[in-house]
Image: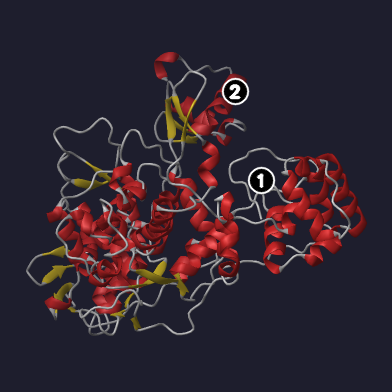
Amino acid sequence: MNLDYYGPFEPATLRDLLCMRKASELAKLAKMLTNAPIPAKVDDRIQLLLDLVAKFGLRALWDRFDPAAQAILTEIIYGESRYFDEGRFAARYADVLPEWAERFTIDPGKQSTSLLDLLCCHDTVPDDIREELLQFVPPPPKPKLTILEEVPHFIQFEEVASKNFPDGAEVIPVISEAAALHDVLSVLHLIGNGKIAVNSPPKKKSRAAKEELPQTNKTGASALLKVLHAGDSTDAPFNRVADAIRPFAWIRLLQAGGLVTATKTRFQLTRAGQQALAKTPQEIILALWEAWLSTRDADESLRIDPSLNQSHVKLSPPPRRREAILRGLSECPPGAWITMSSFLNYLRASGYGFSIRVSYFFNEEDDYDYDESEYDEWPGTGLGDHLNERYVAAFLWEYAATLGLLDILALPTAYVKEMNRREWSVAGAENIQRFDGLTAFRITPLGAYCLGLSPAYTPPAHECYALFHVLPNADIVLRDPEACTPVDTATLGRFAVRHGDHSWQLSIKSVLDALETGFSKTQILDFLTARSDAPLPDTVLHLIEDTARRAASVVCTGLVSLYEAVDETTALLIAHDKEGRKYCFHAGANRLAVPHGQVRKFRTALRKLGILVSIAHE
């Protein structure tokens, strides 16, 4: 068949399509439908084919197509672009495509005329027959995801046979949800304590370089790594910040969420970051996820190919790429392990494509511009496909999994490098293959909540363990200092004062300080109860309960304006007036307090009493 990949012309009618065929092609098509003599003139051959189509009918012609031709025609007439998308077809019909692979070659010399060429030209179908085809051609099958029935322990690729991995590579499961719930508060506390330095920017920054979010240095990344619950999610050696995944991602996520900002020397919490310390981990994670989806200040593509950070490379908006991946994720069943190859095929087959780079063209002013129409296209072959696939892996592994939305199955870094040794010979291959180890993933309960697949989220119950002993005098003494995590230490420091290497003191002042910063009475009691080796003493319970009750005894109901009458008698007259008392109250002596929202009505009530507010007293 002849699928012309170069012509933009769309035939409006079947006659237009046949007029684009060569005389020899018309003859071949006619011989497929009739044994009658073929006319010599081109116009007569076109009319003969039109008569044959009318005689047989499109339904009869459809029945004569082989399964591959029927699938191609279905993709064209139901596709949004009305063009044949070879890559999308391959993803949707991966099990049948190899049998007809040579039909789709771009080289016209290797193509042969088929009956499908009677209805298709330039990868599209004329409008006059498309509507009729839609009456009886069934829609294309819905793409399917491959779900792992059993989680593999070893994986062996045929092309990787070496003495280093004779039995294949052991799959590394990375369980992320519990780690993320722990890590988000750990990292915030660490930054709040001024422990993470900002990496010094280069003295001479290239003008071509795109702006990126500030990052920490190796020392700061190492400090982050120490407080993370399960360490990093990769076994790659930690030689530079860029080699890490979770420490690198947490700084980016917190900056994108507006919780952290960078000074010249250190990262610090913003006001929103300080307020976030009083929220639950799942609330913070949901906010960070939503912020990351919309941020343009960071681009995952630079993690897989730094050469994209050049002025001559035009990149598509990152939020649009993330949206395409998000549409695919939202259709994955939570809790099921899905292979990465299946997910990539599903994105392509479902039309959830994107392009990292966009093409240039010359506009009327002979200046470069880019073609926005390529935003929703998936590059056909070569490095473009690799970049898109690695982009999906980077988004899922470095950001979704770091936030606890996904658990992943990964391969050892050494095995991935050996697997790619023959495949990659281009510069920067070490960056492109950073996320190649992602083999499968599953959506966690936290992920189902953040992705909108579950209406609510219930975090796992707090682990109860005897970490300390609470004395009746409100001293908190550690039983096992080595079991005390950075989060435990930071949480204790929010409502108790440390006065020894392994002890804290609870007081009315320390509890008030915690309540004032948003830490609730329930959070304090739950934390102490879960980690105390015995029931809390009554003196400690009373201290916390009484302090919380007194702290809530005064409530701010809003701001007021204070007015002074000439004497107390006048103030009492206004405060007890039928109208005036609705909008003010006596504040002692000759003063009247008026809520801000009632000032205009208060002045109207005064006018009825024959009183005006003088400028000197406002």
Check the image and tell me how it is coloured: secondary structure
Q: Residue 478, image x and y in percent? A: 14, 77
Q: Which residue is mark 1?
A: 122
Looking at the image, tell me whether mark 1 or mark 2 is earlier in sequence order.
Answer: 1
| Left or right, residue 299 beside residue 204 | right
Vertical position of residue 216 compared to residue 456: above or below: above
Amino acid residing under circle 2: Thr
* Tag 1 near tag 2, CB within 8 Å: no
Vertical position of residue 564 compared to residue 616: above or below: below
Residue 80 appears in the picture as rendered? yes
- Circle 2: is it few (<14), some (14-19), or many (20+) Cα within 10 Å? some
Q: Residue 275, image x and y in percent? A: 34, 51
Amino acid residing under circle 1: His
User: Dividing the picture into quarters, in which one does residue 74 lie?
Assistant: bottom right
SS at circle 1:
loop
Task: State the residue at coordinates (86%, 63%).
Answer: 60
How much space separates mark 1 and mark 2, taking CA atoms?
Answer: 77 Å
Q: Residue 26, image x and y in percent? A: 77, 49
- Mark 1 or mark 2, whichever is nearer to me: 1
| Left or right, residue 94 beside residue 40 | left
Task: State the residue at coordinates (42%, 36%).
Answer: 587
SS at circle 2:
helix
Task: State the residue at coordinates (46%, 68%).
Answer: 341
Task: State the residue at coordinates (52%, 42%).
Answer: 374
Vertical position of residue 145 compared to residue 318: above or below: below
Residue 604 badge: 2
| Left or right, residue 597 beside residue 266 | right
- Circle 1: is it few (<14), some (14-19), or many (20+) Cα within 10 Å? many
